Image (tube, coloured by chain):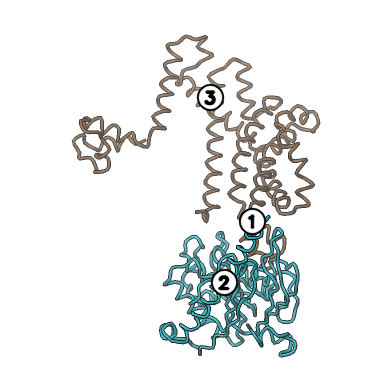
Chain colours: A cyan, B brown
Amino acid sequence: MSQAITAAPEITLGRTDYGLILQQVSFEYAGVRILEDVHLAIPAGQFVCLLGPSGCGKTTLLRLIAGLETPAAGAITSHGESVTGPSLERGVVFQDYSLFPWMSLRENVSLAIAKARPAMTQAERQIQAEEYLQLVGLQDAWRKYPGELSGGMQQRGAIARTLALGSPVLLMDEPFGALDPVNRVKLQDLLLAIWSGSERKKTVVFVTHDVEEAIYLGDRIIMLGAAPGRIIDDITVDFPRPRARHALLDSREFQALRGRVAAKFHEDLIRRLEAETAIHGVAEGI
Amino acid sequence: MNVSESKVIPVSAPLPAKAAARVAPGTQPATALVLRILRGREGWLFLAGLLLLWQLASTHLHLSSKYLFPTPWVTLRALWVSLPELLKGTVSSFIILVPAYLLAVFAGIAWGLLVGTTPALHRMFAAFARLASPVPPTVYIPYAIALLPTFRTAAGFVVFIGVFWPVFLNTTSGAAALPQRYRDNARILGLKKGEYLWRIVFPAALPHIFSGMNVGLVFSFIMLTVAELFGASAGLGRFVQYYADYADYPRMVAGILYTGLVVLLAIELLERLKKRALFWVK
């Protein structure tokens, strides 16, 4: 289903041209297979959306890439290096509560800077922290604590902190999933502006279950099916950037893409149901 | 303390809508007013009632000798007269209590954070903690006095034990209950163990730690005053014991009241510290 991309990456490009390479990655939890045979190569600077229904293991896949979990089988490489644990090379934004509530916004960002650039003095760190907060539109709130901020502002802060790490890989786990529609749209645009505005584009893996969000943001959509989680489709989204949201949403191409995604999920659902009936059929025979 | 407020409001003054709505139809406005003034001050009312009961019991009951059960007024005078001695006793008690308390809090937090975040340490220490922590520290007092060179070190030791366990146990459970998301974020940021303990686990466990410190504070006063009953030459517990021995019950009761007041103040102080430290808890 995904021809060129799932071919062995070493052949088409040098290993280091890839931001992330996953080879036959699988994961089990309590004896249950969560992810099976995930094979994926992401070129550096690509914006990839992991799209799938809940329970398909997309968050688990992100945690594996982050190094927060260890795969049961297979290998993950990030910019040519094997992933064995979390690293400053891969910043993560979680869905919510990423910031430490006992630190002000500036302290939260400063902490990341202190880890990424230990040589800096505290004064320099604080100035830089304020710059990162300015980048996400929080320049006036640096004194505030996460508990005093709205969900949208907290996520802006979390993005600022992750950017402050300066990681070439940015992993985002449904970062806008808990936000209201208006804030969600604002933050999507902010993220795209920051991503495309940087000189060396970051490799982004963005987990979502929202089809429109995936199409609007991504260069590429990796669709995951459930039980066990595995890649069921690999779609290139080649709408030119910058993307105009309304024109894009109304376009025929967008509708076609959404149709393809919906059909694929439907197909996976049917397959799963049939598998269940088959098991039942056997069980009834006994 | 709120007398002026009640004087200012004339009886005929219209009640605010909220208060008026609560008054049942047919209730006299004067009764309603009294009820309204008393709202939120039930605690003081109870204390006043208790004081009155004390007064009546000490003057009318003739339970036993009036020396054994002094009136509030006699007690107050005894308190006033003994104030210099009580203050000196407080200083003497605090010289033991404060360092022992602080040391125990520090040790309990540090060790609790380590044990709570290091499974191997937890396995090593858990059995011992389960065995040793429930022992009432008062039982160590005679031995501590016999074993240690001075009364102060002995009393300090017992206070330390009394404070250490609640602080340690609460810190450990607070550290062990650290939400996964904080752990993940700390790992993503690449925090080293020391930083992780100090900047993440410690603040996250603070609500637990404060409840341990609160229990420990009450314990520390119990330990100290009990220890002072055994062998002190000064201090709050010693004061009470001394006047009980001489059957000066007004002073003894005054000593009890005064001790209660000191403990109350100490708890209040800790409560304020907690409010400041936990400003971020919603």
Q: Residue A142: x, y in percent?
A: 51, 69
Q: Residue A60: x, y in percent?
A: 64, 67
Q: Chain of mark 3?
A: B
Residue designated by label 2: A52
**Label 1 SS:** helix
**Label 2 SS:** loop
Badge 1 or badge 2: first in the primary sequence = 2
Q: Chain of mark 1?
A: A
Residue designated by label 3: B254
Cα distance, mark 1 to mark 2? 32 Å
Looking at the picture, which amino acid does disc 3 mark?
Answer: Ala
Residue situated in front as seen by the camera: B152 or A50: A50
Looking at the picture, which amino acid does disc 1 mark?
Answer: Glu
- Mark 2 Cα shell of 10 Å, populated few (<14), some (14-19), many (≥20): many
Cα distance, mark 3 to mark 2? 73 Å
Residue designated by label 1: A284
Q: Give the residue displayed 64% in from the left and 51% down from the top.
A: B177
- Please determine whether, in this image, residue B169 is positioned above or below residue A107: above
Task: Determine if marks 1 and 2 fall on one subunit.
Answer: yes
- Please determine whether, in this image, residue B22 is positioned above or below residue A254: above
Evaluate whether residue A129 shows in this view.
no
Tally of numbered tags: 3
Q: Nearer the viewer, mark 3 or mark 1?
A: 1
